[in-house]
Image: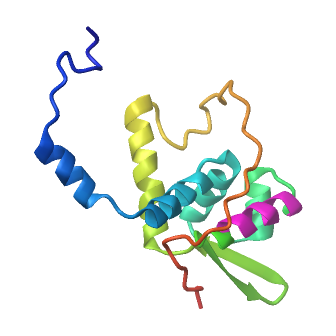
Amino acid sequence: MSEEVCDAVEVHGDRVSNAQSSMPDQALTDSLADFFRIFGDRTRVRILLALDSGEMCVCDISEALGMSMSATSHQLRMLRDAHLVSHRKEGKCVYYSLCDDHVKVVLETALEHVGEADRTPLRNPQRPPSDTPAPGPREPPASNFVARCIPVL
């Protein structure tokens, strides 16, 4: 038989019970899935990575990523609605930053994990682009997310 499937059917009741008792309710798991769905878009991930280095205005984010301001603003609105980024207005400029340290930790932990799996350097501008085309933007479901952001003052 395969290494990926048990050779014998033996349910370990204590492990099943442990898993069931520690499982959050469906509303929370739905919110968690929605949270990770936001990270499923390459453009939004690139925006979050840009903001990981510090606060930036929309113009700077657009320039750094080679995107139109309209496309950048659209993605920032989705990230803001998901409580992953916060913004502040100063004169005519709107500055964005990661919402809080939780977002930074999730992003950096994911980068570390992917780097271990790929065995490739992270944030390497010389790395060739993936042959897989970027998926189109996906709208997140209109549900409440777990995290709530407090705007940066």
Left or right, 110 with reference to 49: left
Left or right, 73 with reference to 30: right
The image shows residue 122, relative to residue 137, as above or below, that is above
Q: Count the marks: how many?
A: 0
Percent coordinates x, y for residue 40 in the rendering: 61, 47
Name the residue nearer the viewer: 122 or 141.
141
**Is 33 inside the magenta-drawn segment?**
no
The image shows residue 140, relative to residue 126, as above or below, that is below
Residue at horizontal 68%, vertical 67%? Answer: 142
**Residue 99 lies in quadrant:** bottom right
Q: How is the image coloured?
A: rainbow
**Residue 133 lies in quadrant:** top right
Secondary structure predominantly adopted by residues drawn in magenta: helix
Percent coordinates x, y for residue 121 in the rendering: 47, 36
- Residue 55 visible in rendering: no
Q: Which residues are magenta?
A: 70-79
For the C terminus, the image quarter is: bottom right
**Residue 108 lies in quadrant:** bottom left
Left or right, 54 with reference to 108: right
The image shows residue 119, relative to residue 62, as above or below, that is above
Percent coordinates x, y for residue 115 in the rendering: 43, 38
Residue at horizontal 53%, vertical 54%? Answer: 36
**Is 73 inside the magenta-drawn segment?**
yes
Name the residue nearer the viewer: 110 or 6.
6
Percent coordinates x, y for residue 106 in the rendering: 44, 59
Residue at horizontal 49%, vertical 41%? Answer: 122
- Residue 49 visible in rendering: yes
For the N terminus, the image quarter is: top left
